[in-house]
Amino acid sequence: MLAIKNNLMAENAARHLGLSYESLAKSIERLSSGLRINSAKDDAAGLAVRELMRADIAVLQQGARNAADGISMLQTMEGAMATIDDLLVRMKELAEQASTGSYSTAQRTIMNNEYQQMIAEIDRIAGDTKFNSIHLLDSANPNNAATIHFGVGSSITVSSVNVTTSALGIASTTLTSTTSAQSALNLMETAIQRKDSARASFGYMMNRLEATHAVLNIQSENMMASESRISDVDVATEMANLTRNQVLSQAGVAMLSQANAMPQMALRLLG
C-alpha cells in the first residue's frame, strides 16, 4: 500500500540496518580486542569463569616466580657452603701437616695462624651470607626457616642449618702441637660430614623447588589454554561474520534509500 504518513518499509529497513550495524560493531570490537567476551553482556557465565581462571593463572605464575626466588636463595647459600667446603679441606690438610713431628714450633705456629684465620672466615661466611636479609647458615633454629608459598594451602619449608665452627665442633681446635693437631684432624672428619649433610639438604631442596617450578609453569600454560578457549575470539569465524554484516549493512543502506523514495510515488499520484 502506498502511504505518505507511515513509511513501514523504511521503518523495517532502518530496524534491520540497525541490527546489522550493531552486529558489525561487535565483530569489529572482537577482532580488534582479540576477545570473544569483552563485557558481561557478551557471555555472563563465560565472563565469570574467565575471571576466576585469570586469577588462578596469576597465582600460578606468581607461585612459579616464588619458586624461582627460592631456588636463587638456596643457590646463594649453597655457593657459600662450597667456599666453606674448600676451607675445611685446607684446614684438614693443615691439621695433617701439623700432626707430624718434622716441623718446628715456629713453623707449626705459622700453620696454626692460617688455620685460625680459616676458622674466623667460616664463621664470617656463615653469619654474613644472606638473601633478602634471610640467614640460613648460622642457626638450625626452626624459627629461621624460610617458607616458599605457591598458592592456597601449598608451600615448601626450607630449614636453616648451622655451619659455624661451633656447630661443626672445630671452634676451639688449634695446631700448636702435634697432639692438638691430631685431635683437630679427627674433629675435621666429623665437621666435614656435618657440613656435607647441611649442603646436601640445600641440594635436594633445590631439586624439589625446580620440579615445583616446572609443574607450576605447566599448570599455568594449561590454564591459559583453557582460558583462551573460553575468552579468545575465533578469528576465522568472526571474519566471516564481519563480512556478512558488512554486506547486510550495505544492503540495508541501499534498501532504506529505496524505501524512503516510495512516498514520492504516492505524491506523483496526488499530482
Image (cartoon, rainbow, N blue to C red):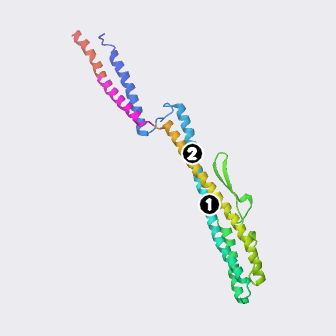
Side of 210 where 112 appears, left or right: right
Above or below for 102 versus 12: below
Task: Look at 41% across and 33% down and name the residue there.
Answer: 237
The mark found on residue 124 in the picture is none
Q: Provide residue 115's location: percent of width, then percent of height.
A: 69, 79
Q: Provide residue 260's location: percent of width, then percent of height.
A: 29, 19
Above or below for 152 versus 133: above
> In the rendered structure, which amino acid carries the disc numbered 1?
Met
Q: Which quadrant holds residue 196?
A: bottom right
Above or below for 95 versus 56: below
Q: Which quadrant holds residue 241?
A: top left
Task: Look at 71% across and 70% down and name the residue there.
Answer: 192
Q: Is residue 236 magenta?
A: yes
Q: Which quadrant holds residue 101?
A: bottom right
Side of 207 where 100 appears, left or right: right
Q: Which residue is mark 1?
A: 73
- Tell me the CA gap for discs 1 and 2: 24 Å
N-terminal of the pair, mark 1 or mark 2, is: 1
Q: Dot 2 surroundings within 10 Å: few (below 14), some, or many (20 or more)? A: some
* Element assignment for label 1: helix
Q: Which residues are magenta?
A: 233-254
Q: Residue furthest left?
A: 271
The mark found on residue 219 in the picture is 2
- Mark closer to the observer (1, 2): 2
Please tell me whether the stretch drawn in magenta is mainly helix, strand or loop. helix
> In the rendered structure, which amino acid carries the disc numbered 2?
Gln
Q: Provide residue 262's location: percent of width, then percent of height.
A: 27, 16
**Screen quadrant of the C terminus:** top left
Q: Is residue 243 magenta?
A: yes
